[in-house]
Image: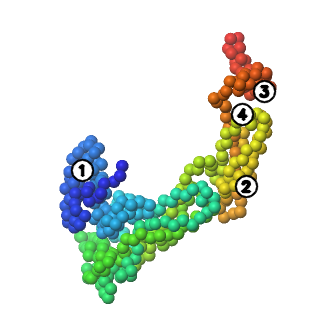
Amino acid sequence: MSKRDFYEVLGVARDADDKSLKSAYRKMAMQYHPDRNPGDEEAEARFKEVNEAYDTLKDGQKRAAYDRFGHAAFENGGFGGGGGAGAHDFSSTMSDIFEEFFGMGGGRRSGGRERGADLRYNLDISLEDAYTGKTVEIEVPTSVTCDTCTGSGAKPGTSPTTCRTCGGSGRVRAAQGFFTLERTCPTCQGRGQVITDPCEDCGGAGRKTQERTLSVNIPAGIEDGTRIRLAGEGEAGVRGGPAGDLYIFLSIKPHDLFQRDGADLYCRVPISMTTATLGGQFDVPTVEGATSRVKVPDGTQTGKQFRLRGKGMPVMRSSQHGDMYIQVTVETPRNLTRRQRELMAEFEKESSGENHPESAGFFSKVKDFIDNLGA
């Protein structure tokens, strides 16, 4: 089921200010809170929906991304590296608690420079692409350094000023009895600097949302589940801080003909009863686009495997290739004509245990088993 529009969830207009957002959120959170609706699964779902909407819209950067890209801004490498708003807010809250009581912060850099978040992007490729390797271009919505203020957050021609509350340290101390507690400065939020005249393009954040096109090199022989790291291609840092990394999580789509096991490939081929009985040959495709001929000896049974050396997947960072295994299944004919039935009846009449050694041996064991029960 598709997500509803976040503004619709909170019942506010798209140009609603922060005060209106907070008021609408408090009203709906109280209405659908689980404590006021015990056992009501629908109310619980609405409560989570309201929280997700508010967590996104209360943040200026996330709201800007949502206004431009909608829910797609938080998929395939959206804000927070795929952890979701809840995980980000929880970690932020715990960090604030430790900073408040124990002075154990330190996530912010001097001058307000903060490292950008890592991002995740899920990429699906075909088995053929994994065999040959290729370069793929992807579109990633992310935060980039504002080119107007070059990441400082201040309007061109101005610069951030030292915070008067903390004197630029980013932390303040307060005496309580015998103890002196240190916590993050509430004025500059630990950055040590304040922006009195913010950049008009980024609102003082030093970065803005933009969709970027990146090229990803897929090496030949890559396996399903491989993670590719693009250093510095994640979310831009705050106030000129270093960018995070982008992680590409690779999935190989199922193939119509081949199944993969490491560097080896498996292909199931049905053959006719006459080919299995009298012997013959057939051509099978290989993953590189060629064909290989497989010779079938007479008397071939279902489950027989034929090995084609070096026709599997390439092994990464080497010149070796895996093998391809052809497993045959003997197909029983259907919709026989009258003449075909007569021929099959004649064959059955003339056949003996030597023609069907496995079935003859099995039923011989069955007879012995029944005789032993009656003894």
Foreground pick, 188 / 160: 160
What separation in Å lies between label 1 and label 2 (alpha carbons)?
A: 62 Å
Give the mark nearer the N terminus: 1 vs 3: 1
Give the number of the disc on residue 323. Answer: none
Q: Secondary structure at mark 2?
A: loop
Identify the residue under disc 1.
33
Q: Secondary structure at mark 4?
A: helix
Residue beneath the point at 70% across and 45% down: 326
**Residue 253 pos. (x, y %):** 55, 53
Does residue 175 appear to the left or right of 269 in the view shown? Answer: left
Give the number of the disc on residue 355. Answer: 3
Give the mark nearer the N terminus: 1 vs 2: 1
Type of the residue with mark 1: His
Q: Nearer the viewer, mark 1 or mark 3?
A: 3
- Residue lying at the far right in this picture: please name it: 354
Q: Secondary structure at mark 3?
A: loop
Q: Nearer the viewer, mark 4 or mark 1?
A: 4
Give the mark nearer the N terminus: 2 vs 4: 4
Give the number of the disc on residue 273. Answer: 4
Identify the residue under disc 2.
310
What separation in Å lies between label 4 and label 1 (alpha carbons)?
A: 68 Å
The answer to whether any part of residue 91 appears in the image is: no
Q: Nearer the viewer, mark 3 or mark 2?
A: 3
Residue beneath the point at 54% across and 65% down: 136
**Residue 362 pos. (x, y %):** 72, 24
What separation in Å lies between label 3 and label 2 (alpha carbons)?
A: 36 Å
Residue 38 appears in which quarter of the rendering? top left
Mark 4 Cα-neighbour bin, 10 Å: few <14, some 14–19, many ≥20: some
Foreground pick, 87 / 322: 322
What separation in Å lies between label 2 and label 4 (alpha carbons)?
A: 29 Å
- Residue lying at the far bottom in this picture: please name it: 157
